[in-house]
Amino acid sequence: MTPDDRLAAIHARIASAARTARRDPADVTLIAVSKTQPVEAIRPLLALGHRDFGENRVQEAQDKWPVLREKFPDARLHLVGQLQSNKAADAVAIADAIHSVDRSSLVTALARAMDAADRRPALFVQVNIGEEPQKGGCAIADLPALLAEARAADLPVGGLMCVPPAAVEPAPYFALLARIARDAGLPALSMGMSDDVEQAVTLGATHVRVGSALFGARA
Ligand SMILES: *Cc1c(COP(=O)(O)O)cnc(C)c1O
């Protein structure tokens, strides 16, 4: 399949799931997760008019995106990977959105970096929705305190993000994240990847993060 076909296929999956849920597909942002992909693999999607991309490492984003943005200055970059506090300033400088805010020290570092740079990427708090010890994300029980801290620091938190446990049905986890976000008054939901876009959109995803279904398997 060409990049064109792949992009059309994902948009069709989003549209079909949105129809089922009586949602407007335009309310779902497709983030093309281009981690590990070379710029040559990203350019065709930019040329087709796609604008939202995701990277999981700040260093890799710094290597790839300045050159891509020369020709496509309106591309939007979403950081979706775990972020070290000492990379907060670099993340704020390059990202339009950060999906992995998950702890107090990072809230502090991002607040300082945003004030210093006078730049405010949209933020999502990542929730460890399956309570998996090895995974990033804030524990569900710790979320209210973290959100309060982010609001006190005037951080633009707009939603929640999750990566559900692998190899089990994700829908209950998406539904749980949606309920937690609603209770917290947060409108955005970053959930759903290549294999579960439909479930995520049906359950209210506003941002889906799709890598392999768009670019092919990662090396
Ligand atoms: C890699 C990655 C994705 C994309 O995963 P695919 O299964 O390739 O679609 C989405 N979200 C995060 C946080 C990722 O690291």
Image (spheres, helix red, strand yellow):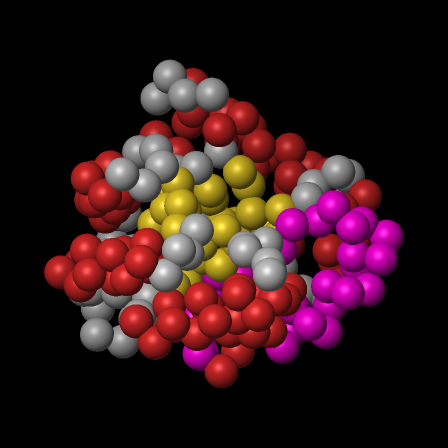
Q: Quadrant of the C terminus?
A: bottom right
- Across and down, in percent, residue 129 comes to 23, 57
Q: Residue at x 60, y 61 (%)?
A: 118
Q: Residue furthest left?
A: 141
Q: Is residue 102 magenta?
A: no
Q: x%, y% of residue 127?
A: 28, 58
Above or below, comparing residue 27 to residue 19 in the picture = below
Quarter of the picture containing the N terminus is top right
- Give 157 or 159, whichever is nearer the viewer: 157
Image coords of residue 135 (percent x, y): 30, 71
Residue drawn where x is 71% and y is 49% of the image: 75
Residue located 21% across and 68% down the image: 132
> In the displayed structure, does residue 179 sit left or right of residue 207?
left
User: In front here: 18 or 194?
Assistant: 18
Query: Is residue 182 at least partly visible in the picture?
Result: yes
Relative to 48, is 57 on the left or the right? left
- 78 drawn magenta: yes
- Farthest residue, direction right: 71
Q: How many numbered discs sit on the rendered protein? A: 0
- From what the image shows, is residue 2 above or below residue 38? above
Q: Residue at x 77, y 39 (%)?
A: 48
Q: Is residue 167 visible?
A: no
- Side of 141 where 54 appears, left or right: right
Query: Which residues, given as a range, are shown in magenta?
Result: 57-85
